[in-house]
Image (tube, rainbow, N blue to C red):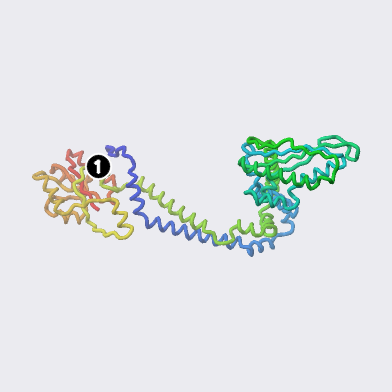
Amino acid sequence: MENYYSDEELDLKLILLYVLKKWKPILLVSFVGLLLGSCLSLFRMQNNSPESILKRLNKLEESDINEYNIQLYSDYKKLYDAHVAYENDSALMKLDANNVYTGNLVYSISAENKDIDSIGASLSGVLEINNNLEGLAESTDYSAEELRELIDIKFSRSDKSSLISTDNNANGLLSIKVYGVDHDSVEDIVNKLETLVNSTLKSIRGDYSGESIIKVQDSVVFGTDLDLLGMQSEETRVKQNILTSLTNAEAKLSDDEKMYYGYYYNYDEYFAETKSHFSKKWPVVLCVAGGVLACAWYFFVFLFDGHFKSEDEYRDRYGLKLLSVIDLNKKEYKGIDKIINGFEKVVFNDDEYLKSVLRSFGDKKVFLCTDNEKLKEKIGNEIRCFGTLDIDNKAVDELRESDGVILSSEIGKTEYKLIERQIEVAKRNDKEVFGIISIR
């Protein structure tokens, strides 16, 4: 048999309309998915409730639980959570160490060996006295906790004098660093710190003899700060090491031990994670999945369905001329069906148009090939009708006496292979196929 199929592209609009017309079974499958998801959520809610878990724990033997492994996991979990919280909340960790403004305020201190450490302690603790930290926070855009991180004050001895000698002078450095994201705020904090240091110097002057305090650096620079970069890298390394230990400790826990830990060590967080309340996740997921799978099913049905789905296929597949489109079933669509079928924009022809088409063949002996009784009644005596053409049926004998045939097809019911067979029989008998009448 001759191959009538053309290399036509898939008509996306036709596929979409075909799938949309199946909205009722698709909706039914989605509803079934919704019910299954609801049942699953109810089961999980019941199975993961505190009461259910406690019953399961009470059934465990003492040998089923290793308290040491659970405690080890708990300790690492607390430590890791603390580092994560610090990293999320820390003003210092949020800075980019490669693009940061750093204010430097450095003082060189010289005093008697017995006094140098006391002076250094007084100056390095300048933020902790007289509510200086809170006062500084009120005059900046930072909180006291943020300033405690962003300001680094250190005192170090820079000489090798004996700590118990009272005869020698000693030297030291007071180093103040301020980190920030813009030049003006860092410079402002540095200036305020200098004021605090000078105020502290005035208050302790006279308590010591022979001291000398000189400012040797006062600057704000932008770029990479190696101290900050090192501190951030160390924090990240420590957190990663703790995470590795936490992962190893968790791997040693059985499912029963994890349940034991959750119930007795981490009650609130555990039952939030186990979804002991009704979850909308599974109803929604299975409802959507059901709808998607149903649509996919009808898409594949469309691809392998052997029935005509639109009048365009007569021309695209077989090059047939469409003579008329008639509505024999007189279906009245409502609601969603009416909207969907409205997209097809099918133009129906009335009875008079159909009869005029048939009369246009004049004296030619044209037979209409159809088994549809309603169509036969509508045509009346305009043209002779016979049944479906086949190789051995009686219609072939009548076909030989004609000049050609007109075929008929009902959308959604007539198969491609039937039309192919009728065209083949007509060609074998050297008869012309004048066109086709489409039935809806």
Q: Which residue is mark 1?
A: 315
* Side of 53 relative to 319 (left or right): right
- In the picture, the quarter occupied by the N terminus is top left
Residue at position x 35%, y 53% in the image: 20
172 w.r.t. 282: above or below: above
Question: What residue lies at 24% left-to-right and 57% top-to-bottom?
Answer: 329
Query: Residue 227 location in percent, x, y?
Result: 70, 38
Q: Residues within 10 Å of mark 1 (few under 14, many from 20)?
A: few
For label 1, the SS is: helix
The residue lying toward the viewer, choosing from 27 and 153, is 153
Q: Residue at x 14, y 48 (%)?
A: 357
Q: Amino acid at mark 1?
A: Arg
| Nearer to me, 376 or 402 | 376
Residue 62 position within the rendered picture, expressed as x and y whole percent measured from the top left: 74, 59
Where 360 falls versus 265 (above or below)? above
Residue 172 lies left or right of residue 101; in this view the side is right
- Any part of residue 394 in sight: no
Out of 110 and 144, give the one closest to the viewer. Answer: 110
Percent position of residue 284, x then y = 48, 56
Q: Is residue 213 visible?
A: yes
- In the picture provided, is 104 more to the left or to the right than 429? right
Instruction: Report the number of discs.
Output: 1
For residue 434, what is the image quadrant?
Answer: top left
Residue 214 picture location, percent across and down? 77, 37
